[in-house]
């Protein structure tokens, strides 16, 4: 039987982002926490995070499964496919995030944070008891080295923010100050979330080189055993320096966390059914409702839970690589969106149960309206009016079909747009341009689907879509590669169309530049798979980072959402308003759930093992 779960009452003001900048931090005094706007929700001296159970027992283990493989234990560089867990369990940051708030941080390695009202600088003071797992103290020198190294030799995701650092310097025995090249509200928070590594470990070594040497961290777990590409286990550090911090109460309860790697998502599920792993996220609502009648579920040994959330839908679907000539014309992209028969797919694959992603920030207060832009949103868009695709200002919505397989009305719309773009169906039934070249492109997929693609395996979607495309004379090549090839090809943008997932939060900020900023067009490893090169996107992302209050922040997010959605860069599919978790009955989580639900910071962070409850 499905166990009920209860979503805590979240104040409307919290969901719609925090109040305006005010309070004690305006006077640049050391504080226990920091929020994007206003004050952190938890008072100084709080006992535990609201979604953690401080009475949870310690002990037991949790075994999780991953599709694919790994060849690196360094998750902070571009090279290689890193193992799960290193960053989450063994390495800490100066501040820790509460996932019950849009964006608030509380002291972790740092006992305090200080910044000026304009946030032109931020200063952190380390806790005197902070230690790496080998017993050595975490020093200011370790912090400065970590920031400089990640910013210059680490993964590109660290380079954008590092480029905005004017200086980083030691200002006391346990204190450092970071000064920024320009005021930007989020930078003070981002600097609190960089991983802190041990400088001494990397002396005389090339940090950016592929390695199977794990970082020495200060986190709750240490690496126990590993067989490259097959499994990795972590054991709870009994001497962990941070076990008594209020921020950590009720967290990190398992003695052991293990990840086993399997060929693809289907094999992971069979391993779960066979008792080899302890938990499985079901990606398909129809399977969730119809395929869980195996003996362990019937006997109650396996429990089914649904975890709701209040975060944005994010974007999940088929990404056009606009670096390729065939996808540069927005009319071509719109035509291929028209052919994507969401209503038919949803009914065939999900019994019609899942909502469609209607924009990048749908399902949240940051999501755009689909009518004409008004007020401040219209003002933000107006400087770019001549370069924006149709619908950005006037209003844009994804096409809706009649739910029938042939989707004739939208197919006719698609053919009209393709004709305007210079493509017509020839006598042989193939869509061709005026030189006779066929409309050919490749869809790149990863073998086995799995969590890489988010809440579902895209293969059944692709099968239906390819059949629909054939009716208008388009016959794409579908290429399924192994994990290593998929990573290599997407990092180098060596694809025409690929399934892309970008999870978004209630506090979009600097990561937006990595997702769709123009600097990522030619930067290998960036998340800008689509090749978005838009002055409007760049300007609105900058405006988002410099919004002075809640009202301006939301209006800017609405404007950015419009430009991205009407840009027709991705064919969105659907999202789930909750996660579906099947797990052994011995592992548990608190009844009070975080705002973000089953997301970063939830599993296995606040779960525990208990034979009976």
Image (cartoon, rainbow, N blue to C red):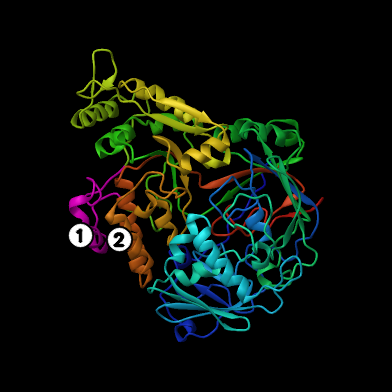
Viewer-closest of 573 and 138: 138
Who's the residue at 53% across and 50% down the image?
78
Q: How many residues crowd around disc 2 within 10 Å: few (fewer than 14), some, or many (20 or more)?
A: some
Against 319, residue 442 (above or below) is above
Q: Which mark is residue 539?
A: 2
Q: How many residues crowd around disc 1 within 10 Å: few (fewer than 14), some, or many (20 or more)?
A: few
Verify whether residue 392 appears in magenta: yes
Q: Which mark is residue 383?
A: 1
Q: Residue furthest top?
A: 428
Residue 493 is situated, as x and y percent measured from the top left of the image, at: 42, 41
Number of callouts = 2
Q: Quadrant of residue 144?
A: bottom right
* Left or right: 91 in relation to 432: right
* Left or right: 99 in relation to 260: left
Q: Quadrant of residue 51?
A: bottom right
Segment colored magenta: 370-397
Residue 117 is situated, as x and y percent measured from the top left of the image, at: 42, 81
Residue 118 is situated, as x and y percent measured from the top left of the image, at: 39, 79
Who's the residue at 52% across and 65% down the image?
101
Quadrant placement of the N terminus: top right
Viewer-closest of 447 and 403: 447
Viewer-closest of 236 and 52: 236
Verify whether residue 549 appears in magenta: no
Q: Are marks 1 and 2 in contact (CB under 8 Å)?
A: yes
Against 102, residue 130 (above or below) is below
Who's the residue at 76% across and 70% down the image?
135
Q: Spatial distance from mark 1 to mark 2, Cα to Cα?
A: 10 Å
């Amino acid at each position: 039987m499905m166990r009920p779960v209860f979503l805590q009452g979240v104040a409307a003001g919290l969901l719609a982002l925090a109040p305006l900048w005010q309070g004690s931090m305006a006077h640049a005094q050391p504080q226990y926490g920091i929020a994007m706007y206003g004050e952190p929700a938890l008072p100084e001296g709080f006992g535990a995070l609201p979604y953690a159970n401080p009475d949870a027992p310690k002990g037991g283990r949790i075994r999780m499964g991953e599709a694919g493989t790994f060849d690196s234990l360094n998750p902070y560089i571009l090279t290689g496919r890193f193992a799960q867990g290193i960053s989450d369990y063994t390495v800490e940051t100066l501040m820790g995030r509460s996932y019950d708030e849009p964006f608030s941080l509380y002291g972790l390695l740092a006992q305090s944070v200080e910044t000026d009202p304009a946030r032109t600088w931020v200063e952190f003071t380390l806790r005197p008891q902070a230690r790496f797992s080998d017993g050595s103290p975490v020093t200011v020198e370790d912090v400065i080295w970590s920031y400089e190294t990640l910013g210059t030799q680490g993964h590109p995701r660290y380079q954008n923010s590092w480029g905005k650092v004017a200086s980083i310097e030691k200002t006391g025995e346990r204190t450092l100050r970071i000064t920024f090249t320009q005021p930007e509200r989020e930078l003070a928070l981002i600097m609190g979330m960089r991983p802190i590594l041990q400088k001494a470990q990397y002396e005389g070594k090339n940090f950016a080189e592929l390695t199977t040497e794990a970082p020495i961290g200060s986190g709750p777990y240490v690496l126990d055993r590993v067989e490259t590409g097959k499994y990795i286990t972590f054991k709870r550090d009994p001497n962990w320096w941070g076990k008594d911090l209020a921020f950590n109460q009720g967290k990190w309860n398992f003695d052991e966390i293990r990840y086993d790697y399997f060929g693809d998502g289907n094999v992971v599920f069979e391993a779960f059914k066979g008792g080899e792993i302890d938990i499985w996220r079901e990606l398909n609502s129809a399977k969730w409702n119809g395929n869980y009648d195996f003996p362990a579920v019937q006997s109650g040994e396996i429990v089914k839970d649904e975890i709701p959330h209040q975060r944005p839908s994010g974007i999940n679907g088929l990404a056009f690589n606009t670096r390729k000539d065939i996808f540069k014309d927005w009319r071509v992209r719109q035509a291929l969106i028209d052919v994507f028969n969401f209503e038919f797919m949803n009914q065939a694959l999900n019994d019609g149960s899942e909502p469609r992603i209607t924009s990048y920030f749908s399902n949240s207060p940051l999501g755009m309206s689909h009518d004409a832009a008004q007020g401040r949103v219209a003002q933000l868009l107006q400087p770019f009016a001549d370069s924006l695709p149709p619908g950005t200002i006037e209003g844009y919505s994804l096409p809706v079909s009649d739910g029938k397989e042939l989707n004739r009305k939208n197919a006719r719309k698609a053919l009209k747009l393709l004709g305007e773009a210079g493509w017509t169906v020839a006598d042989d039934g193939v869509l061709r341009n005026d030189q006779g070249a066929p409309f050919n492109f490749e869809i790149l997929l990863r073998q086995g689907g799995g969590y890489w693609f988010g809440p579902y395996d895209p293969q059944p979607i692709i099968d239906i879509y390819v059949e629909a495309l054939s009716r208008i004379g388009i016959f794409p090549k579908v290429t399924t590669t192994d994990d290593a090839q998929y990573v290599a090809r997407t990092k180098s943008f060596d694809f025409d169309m690929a399934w892309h997932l970008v999870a978004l939060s209630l506090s979009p900020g600097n990561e937006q530049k990595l997702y769709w900023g123009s600097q990522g067009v030619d930067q290998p490893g960036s998340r800008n798979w689509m090749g978005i090169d838009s002055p409007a996107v760049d300007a609105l992302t900058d405006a988002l980072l410099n919004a002075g209050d809640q009202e301006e922040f939301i209006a800017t997010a609405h404007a950015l959402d419009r430009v991205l959605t009407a840009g027709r860069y991705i064919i969105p599919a659907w999202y789930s308003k909750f996660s579906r978790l099947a797990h052994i009955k011995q592992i548990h989580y608190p009844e009070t759930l975080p705002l973000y639900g089953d997301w970063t910071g939830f599993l296995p962070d606040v779960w525990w093992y208990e034979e009976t409850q």
